[in-house]
Amino acid sequence: MSASAQLAPTTSPARSGTSRTSAPAAERRPRGRAARWGWSILAIVVAVIWVFPVYWMVNSSMLSSATLESFTPTFLPFGGSFANYRGVIDGSFFGALGISLAVTVIAVFFCLLFAFLASVAISRFRFRGRTTFVLAILIIQMLPAEGLFIAQYKMMSELGLLSNVFGLSLLYIAAVVPFTVWMLRGFVTGVPAELEEAAMVDGLSRTQAFMRITLPLLAPGLVASGVFAFLQCWNEFTVALVIMNAENQTLPLWLRGFVQQSSSRAIDWGEVMAASTIVAIPVIVFFVIVQGRMTSGLVAGAVKG
């Protein structure tokens, strides 16, 4: 009886302490749940605000000019049609689409090739002028594109590459390569060189070790860099405006034709929105295809740079 009497006072405070600590924890749970709900609602509101211009573009592309010019906004395309799309898809559209695809594919391919080789050289080898080369890449990125227009035009004119797919691709490659080199450098540095050395110990050559071990690990980085290069080449307007003529236009230049107002024809905003939607479709399809690789590539590039 005496032992039980001694144990009773020691166990009761522990139980009371447990009840004191569990009560604030129970109070914090509703607060944490409310905070999560609040952040979720805020994220949904921000997403709706971000998506609304895209929705408005697609919605307006199905409405007539009279409906678009009225003072009452139409938020749903009830009674709309695809007449605006039929009006913009003509011979000039397919010609501009072919030029944009050719220029973008050529520029992205060679840009990734040159940037990949340069980033490997910077990350894996130590050579004289390495730091100067990296600084030169940063300085080139600081130059305004408009300051190079006259020199680029004279150079393309002397080479006979004005209004030429290869000439425009060459300028795009020169413009996109510095940023792509700087971006890929972080991915290559993030792959330990010890993996290649271990493969070489197992009997592989340096080239085989790089192709079988390092290159697959760099695939997400190549995809992420390729997406940025694709966007820069696909949406570029000013260089194409200087180099290309009215017969050979990229899609951004073709889209400008719907915005220009002449003395005989006012701007048809329905066709402008339809043309804008058509130009955005290849980018959306490209993102849907590479979104998984791009997400892992961006995360991998953020680990070590």
Image (cartoon, helix red, strand yellow):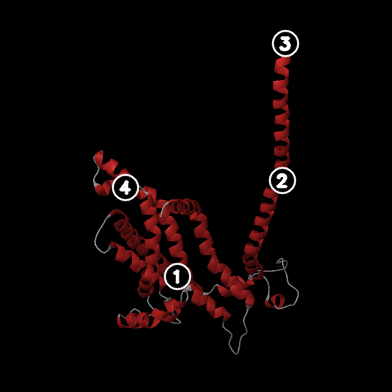
Report if the CB atoms under discs 2 and 4 are less than 8 Å apart: no
Q: Which residue is mark 2?
A: 31
Report the mark closest to the observer, 2 or 4.
2
Separation (CA) of disc 4 from disc 1: 39 Å
Pointer 2 or 4: first along the chain: 2
Under mark 2, the amino acid is: Arg
Under mark 1, the amino acid is: Ser
Under mark 4, the amino acid is: Ala
Numbered badge on residue 54: none
Q: Which residue is mark 1?
A: 100
Separation (CA) of disc 4 from disc 3: 71 Å
106 and 181: which is toward the camera: 181
| Left or right of 91, for residue 222 | left
Residue 27 is drawn in which quadrant?
A: top right
Numbered badge on residue 193: 4
Pointer 4 or 3: first along the chain: 3
Separation (CA) of disc 3 from disc 1: 94 Å
Q: Is residue 244 visible?
A: no
Pointer 2 or 3: first along the chain: 3
Report the mark closest to the observer, 1 or 2.
2
Q: Can you name the residue that lies furthest to the bottom here? A: 263
